[in-house]
Image: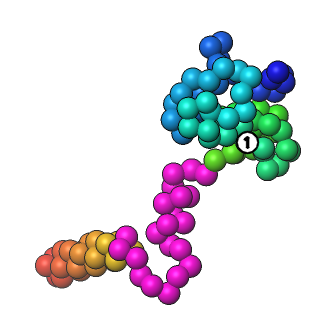
Amino acid sequence: MASKNLVQGEKGLLCLKCSHLNPGNLKECEYCNSQLFIKCKKCGAKVQRVLSQCQKCRHRLHKSILSKLERKMFARSRKITLGQFGLLIILAIFMYQAIKMVSDKL
């Protein structure tokens, strides 16, 4: 049985991974076996995976798209990634155009 701090729809719990609607009494998705609940790292409350914040303490449960992108683009590695190379090319073109525009005005 679900506790008061859990939010579930009238029809059941939605799986974040496969979007299957599960009965409210399950802990795992009956279709893909993915966990339907996670534990809040700040307060330890049991929260549905589809929620973005803990309902008890308002702690953010999932990382934002920008933080995931930043982690992938600027990983601590000695090798340059394809994304970093692309950013360097774009920056070089932008700087070239800016310098060219300034020199044409002089």
Q: Is residue 55 visible?
A: yes
Q: Quadrant of residue 50?
A: top right
* Position of the C terminus by quadrant: bottom left
- Above or below residue 50? Residue 25 is above
Image position, residue 26 (x, y; %): 71, 27
Give the residue displayed 72% in from the left and 33% down from the top: 27
- Above or below residue 80? Residue 53 is above
- Number of callouts in the render? 1
Residue type, numbered disc 1? Ile
Q: Is residue 99 magenta?
A: no
Give the residue displayed 67% in from the left and 35% down from the top: 28
Residue extending farthest to the top is: 10
Along the viewing direction, whichever of 101 and 31 lies nearer the viewer: 31
Image position, residue 44 (x, y; %): 85, 44
**Viewed as shown, does residue 76 lie left or right of 12?**
left
**Viewed as shown, does residue 97 lie left or right of 29?**
left
Q: Local crowd at mark 1 within 10 Å, few (<14), some, or many (≥20)?
A: some
Image position, residue 37 (x, y; %): 71, 37
Q: Could you say whether the residue bearing mark 1 is in a helix, strand or loop?
A: strand
**Viewed as shown, does residue 37 lie left or right of 5?**
left
Magenta stretch?
63-83
Per the image, the residue denoted by label 1 is 38
Q: Is residue 68 magenta?
A: yes
- Above or below residue 60? Residue 30 is above
Q: Quadrant of residue 48?
A: top right
Give the residue displayed 41% in from the left and 82% down from the top: 80
Give the residue displayed 80% in from the left and 37% down from the top: 46
**Viewed as shown, does residue 53 lie left or right of 31?**
right
Image position, residue 93 (x, y; %): 24, 75
Q: Is residue 52 visible?
A: no
